[in-house]
């Protein structure tokens, strides 16, 4: 089987992992892991709190512009929270450093890629072991 995995622009072969325009030779990969990145809470909350302050200032000082800007910032903060996605990243460890190979909102896909890379690494190690221990003759 020459290409055990080829889906959504990611391919894993007997020799390499190719994703997002990057190629990682299997002989260089030491480990892979899936990292989940949660939603950012600070930016939406900060926008909304600034909006509340602006809305209060607009009401206290009788400024319709400050009131409108405050309401708009509250809405932008809410939209920022709603449109963020939880992302999952495939991190590849090579030569003592770790790099992101793939990022997706689809956790089963990222886990499938990680498992395929692990299987390919195990197959390469098994092949190297049998080649090294095979009698010459």
Image (cartoon, helix red, strand yellow):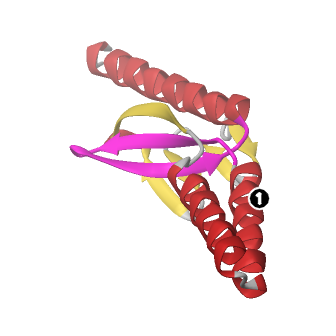
Asked whether, in this view, residue 73 is left or right of residue 132, the answer is right
Quadrant for residue 133, please give it.
top left
Q: Position of residue 54 (x, y in %)?
A: 63, 72
Label 1 residue SS: helix
What residue range appears in magenta? 85-106
Q: Position of residue 4 (x, y in %)?
A: 68, 34
- Residue shown at the point (65%, 66%) measured from the top left: 56
- Residue shown at the point (60%, 29%) measured from the top left: 116
Q: Position of residue 118 (x, y in %)?
A: 49, 25
Quadrant for residue 57, please give it.
bottom right
- Residue shown at the point (65%, 80%) measured from the top left: 61
Q: Nearer the viewer, residue 91 or 61?
A: 61
Quadrant for residue 46, please give it.
bottom right
Q: Which residue is mark 1?
A: 79
Q: Nearer the viewer, residue 131 or 89?
A: 89
- Residue shown at the point (38%, 23%) measured from the top left: 125
Magenta span has 116? no
Secondary structure mainly formed by the magenta segment: strand
Magenta span has 101? yes
Asked whether, in this view, residue 60 is left or right of residue 35, the answer is right
Q: Quadrant of the N terminus?
A: top right
Q: Position of residue 66 (x, y in %)?
A: 69, 81
Asked whether, in this view, residue 31 is left or right of residue 89, the answer is left
């Amino acid at each position: 089987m020459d290409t055990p995995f080829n889906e959504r622009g990611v391919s894993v072969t007997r020799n390499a992992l190719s994703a997002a325009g990057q190629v990682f030779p299997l002989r260089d990969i030491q480990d892979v892991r899936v990292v989940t990145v949660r939603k950012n809470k600070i930016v939406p909350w900060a926008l909304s709190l600034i909006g509340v302050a602006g809305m209060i200032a607009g009401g206290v000082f009788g400024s319709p512009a400050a009131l409108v800007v405050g309401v708009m910032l509250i809405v932008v903060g809410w939209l920022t929270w709603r449109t963020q996605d939880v992302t999952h990243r495939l991190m590849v460890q090579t030569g003592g450093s770790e790099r992101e190979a793939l990022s997706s909102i689809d956790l089963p896909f990222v886990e499938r890629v990680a498992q395929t890379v692990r299987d390919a690494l195990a197959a390469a190690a098994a092949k190297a072991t049998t080649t090294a221990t095979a009698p010459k003759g």
